[in-house]
Amino acid sequence: MNDYLILSITIIYALLAYFIPIILCKKGKLEKFSARSLVHLFAGLSIFSLLFIENKILLFIASAMFTIVLFFSRKSTPVLKFVFNSLNEPEEKKCLQGPILYSAAISFLVLFSAITGNIIVPVASALIMIISDPLASFFGKKYGKNKMSLLSTQRTFEGSFAMMMSAGIIVSLIFGFGIKAFAIGFILAIIELITPSKMDDFSLPLAACILLTNY
């Protein structure tokens, strides 16, 4: 398939992944938290284009442009302010810190693939960010009873355990089952534990990429 066709499909998919939840939120069909969660779940799946596109720099450019758009999506920015108002969390007063770092992480993983020729590690790292991070948050909020505080972060044992297990399972499914897979999951859980909220959207995939490079 032509690279430009793949790129076009990827861009359309990413736009839909962002704007369908945003539009539903603006119409009152979704709460802001749900809209943001859906964007987190589906937007990052665009990285699967790495499996099909040959010129990965094209994909990096597109991803970097998404990051720039999110960077300028602020409450005071004409046109783009509706993106900010639909996705921001209470502590995000000036910019969409979480989504910006999320998009920057995808850009980094695509660039890593373009430079090294490695496809599987970036995809696995993105899946950990897309799946394990929200699972940790869900289990922490719903079942978390044992609070853990480290370097001014607020996490729970239950959330960290969900992070470790889900990351270990993802690594096992892609690279093969083994103790090493769950050891990586444990390290990633520790990294999430010490990373300030919103910044783990970048620290987790970056750490996963480093840990999995020589798996």
Image (cartoon, rainbow, N blue to C red):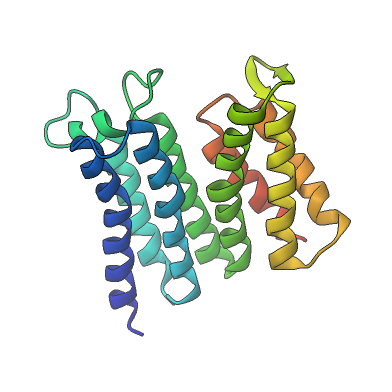
Q: Is residue 61 above or below residue 200?
A: below
Left/right of residue 102 with respect to residue 13 in the rendered view: right
Q: Residue at position x 69%, y 66% from top?
A: 174
Locate the C terminus and report the quarter of the image it occupies. Answer: bottom right
Q: Residue at position x 38%, y 63% from top?
A: 59
Left/right of residue 134 with respect to residue 159 in the rendered view: left
Instruction: Decide which of 123, 88 is in the foreground and name it.
Output: 88
The percent position of residue 166, horizontal first and vertical second, equals: 69, 49
Q: Is residue 111 above or below residue 37?
A: below
Locate the N terminus and report the quarter of the image it occupies. Answer: bottom left
The percent position of residue 30, horizontal first and vertical second, equals: 30, 38
Instruction: Decide which of 214, 42 is in the foreground and name it.
Output: 42
| Res 196 → quadrant | top right
The percent position of residue 158, horizontal first and vertical second, equals: 72, 31
Q: Residue at position x 40%, y 46% from top?
A: 38
Left/right of residue 48 with respect to residue 17 in the rendered view: right
On the question of residue 194 being in view, the answer is yes
